[in-house]
Amino acid sequence: MLNKYYKQKFRERLKEERLLKNLSIKECSQKINVSVSIWLKWERGEALPMGTNASKLSRLFNVKVDYLFGLKDEKS
């Protein structure tokens, strides 16, 4: 059940941060070198990024990984 919570929190925050930066899904996926289909799975809550991809997202949006996954409410 926790996995479902984190996927939901992550997908919400990922989309929110992307829209705040006025970036398309394609632009974001290119910036961190993943396919559009992978990004879409993240935004749909079908998958979670692991390891280096989570770190890349953190740097792209200038937020902590813990924030993206809903572990903390502070962005930085």
Image: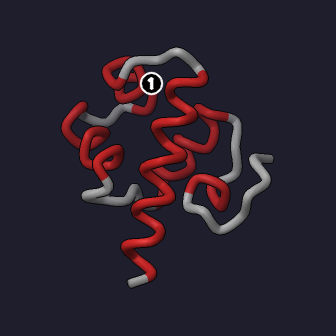
Give how far across and how far down residue 37 sits, in percent. Answer: 19, 38
Question: For the view shown, which residue lies furthest in the left direction?
Answer: 37
Residue 68 vs residue 12, the one in the foreground: 12
At label 1, the amino acid type is Lys
Q: Residue at x 57, y 34 (%)?
A: 17
Q: Is residue 51 above or below residue 31?
A: below
In the image, 36: left or right of 5?
left
Q: How many marks?
A: 1
Give how far across and how far down residue 41 sits, in percent. Answer: 25, 48
| Res 62 quadrant in image | top right
Q: Residue at x 36, y 32 (%)?
A: 33
Residue linked to disc 1: 31
Give how far across and how far down residue 49 sits, in percent. Answer: 40, 55
Q: Which element carries disc 1, helix, strand or loop? A: helix
Q: Residues within 10 Å of mark 1 (few under 14, many from 20)?
A: few
Q: Is residue 74 above or below residue 18?
A: below
In the image, 39: left or right of 59?
left
Give how far across and how far down residue 30 sits, in percent. Answer: 36, 23
Q: Residue at x 47, y 68 (%)?
A: 6
Residue 29 vs residue 13, the one in the foreground: 13
In the image, 58: left or right of 25?
right
Q: Residue at x 45, y 71 (%)?
A: 5
